[in-house]
Amino acid sequence: MKIADVCAFYTPHGGGVKTYIDRKLALGASLGHEVVVIAPGSHDHVELRPGGGRIVHIASPQLLVDRRYRYFDDVAAVHARLDAERPDFVEASSPWRTASIVAGWQGSAPRSLVMHADPLAAYPYRWFGRFGSRETIDRSFDLFWRHLRRLGERFDCVVSANRHLSARLLTGGVAGVATIPMGVDPGLFSPVHRDADLRRDLLARCALPESASLIIGVGRHSAEKRWPLVVDACLAASQHRPIGLVLVGDGRDRGRLVRHIGNNPHVHLLAPIADRLLLAKLMASADALIHGCEAETFGLVAAEAAASGLPLIAPDAGGASDFVGDDNGELYAAGDASAAARAIGRLLARDRSRLRAAAARRAPDTPRIDDHFAALFRHYQLLAMPLRSAA
């Protein structure tokens, strides 16, 4: 089967979507499929990948809010590329303009909307959550829900990677919802990578001794990641025990985050880590991972931490919460720094060796990305089968 993925969120600068796309291209051919990713780029060109698969870049303007990303502004160019590719199945990976572009294509191939973004959780719920319930906010943003319901009618399926988002979509009347969890790179993240010297070095960067607790956070510096909340929660929890916080990432909000941290010597910022093995070592060497974002559609960082045997502190909504159990972590009320501080305190008050042992036992059960793509492609084949039979 030939699958065309119209992916507005792909950027060569990195991020979870790039990790996802890279693995998809590598795995597609081995599963007997040809995967073509159509992405906005600086200029028109085709990028061939070893082992099969291509990324077709269409010249597109930069997003003003984050110039690492671009957006499709030429509908005819995207439709012409789909016409030229003649795919058996088409994906759209954004519920915004890209979904409308794919829905409006006149080709006969079945198509899916993959929810790589949860705009309501990323924006309105975060902005207005202090003033009303999610139900109240949903009523105020019924225009977007009507948009999602129309997309559900125009697509053959809507793919969600976590149970919270799937439940909300179904409650909101969106048709064709299928929950297909994503996963981590096979054979990379593991408790065996724990490195006492690396842990000691990271704590020293936080001006703390080896006896302190090391908490890490990984992700881009943008408002929906809630890093100021994470910093405030760790600062409050450190009134009772020494805590070093290491944040890995970069982004448009870096300056604001640096100002929020101020002169706190116990918070250390690391640049994004492109070396995946080094990231796996860092994951396995910390004492816990903390997550602030409730808008994650899957929670890849939380999954990688879980596969590394790392205890988790996560909000009680969004994809990251799927990896937190009673024995390996703590949940807190999303968006509440005081609740996050209490969750940190509860986790660090536990017996450390028993907690890590429980997290390590869970590690092999973390979903693998290869299983996600195998399930996704099977689902697409089932949807395409009636059309093939008719042809």
Image: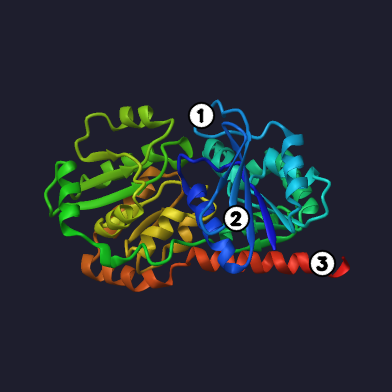
Question: Element type at marker 1?
Answer: loop
Mark 3: amino acid? Arg
Q: Position of residue 294 (x, y in %)?
A: 49, 48
Mark 2 and mark 1 in contact? Answer it, CB < 8 Å. no
- Tell me which numbered mark, 2 or 3, is placed earlier along the sequence: 2
Foreground label between 2 and 1: 1
Question: What quarter of the picture does the C terminus occupy?
Answer: bottom right
Residue 381 picture quarter: bottom right
Residue at 23% across / 52% down in the picture? Answer: 214
- Tell me which numbered mark, 1 or 3, is placed earlier along the sequence: 1
Question: Which is more toward the observer, 8 or 59?
Answer: 59
Label 2, on which residue? Answer: 165
Mark 1: amino acid? Arg
**Residue 136 located left or right of residue 369:** right
Label 3, on which residue? Answer: 388
Mark 2 and mark 3 in contact? Answer it, CB < 8 Å. no
- Tell me which numbered mark, 2 or 1, is placed earlier along the sequence: 1
Question: Element type at marker 3?
Answer: helix
Image disc number at residue 67: 1
Foreground label between 1 and 3: 3
Residue at 58% across / 63% down in the picture? Answer: 29
Residue 168 picture quarter: bottom right
Mark 1 and mark 3 in contact? Answer it, CB < 8 Å. no
